[in-house]
Amino acid sequence: MAFNGTWKIDRNENYEKFMEAMGVNMMKRKLGAHDNLKITLQQDGNKFTVKESSNFRTLDIEFTLGVDFEYSLADGTELTGSWNMEGNKLVGKFTRKDNGKLLTAYREIVGDELVQTYVYEGVEAKRIFKRG
């Protein structure tokens, strides 16, 4: 599967503005922009195992496409939602538990990079990863 492997953060686009829209304070935004995030993805049919490792935490997540699950962002924001496959793109729709607003996330392989795109309240950001 194309997503399988370990991916290390290479660069961000508009990530601080996105975190600001999410309500993340300035100190956490500065730290978050330099979190050295590494993601290991393993797909087995409709099931995914994800290991996120950063300067702040290590987290193991398992999900099945189309099945809701709960997830906490690094800043503690709690979400519930699910991932689905649309073409070659993973599309996640998550609702914040604190305010009911929608966070949409996309994961896709572009060339030799994993591109994660986040959209919240009209603010879009990208985090681009290279195989590590």
Image (cartoon, rainbow, N blue to C red):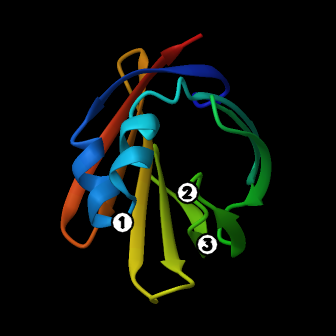
On residue 75, which mark appears?
2
Q: What is the secondary structure assignment of the residue under circle 1? A: loop
Earlier-in-chain disc, 2 versus 1:
1
Residue located at (50% from left, 80% from top):
95
| Front of the two marks 3 and 2 | 2
Q: Which amino acid does label 3 sit on?
A: Glu
**Residue 12 in the image: above or below residue 124:** above
On residue 22, which mark appears?
1
Q: What is the secondary structure assignment of the residue under circle 2? A: loop
Residue located at (44% from left, 47% from top):
28
Left or right relative to 32: residue 78: right
User: In the figure, residue 65 lies in which quadrant?
Assistant: bottom right
**Residue 113 in the image: above or below residue 52:** above
Taking depth in this image into account, of 87 and 120 the one nearest to the observer is: 120
The residue that mark 3 highlights is 78
x and y, in percent, of residue 24 in the image: 40, 59
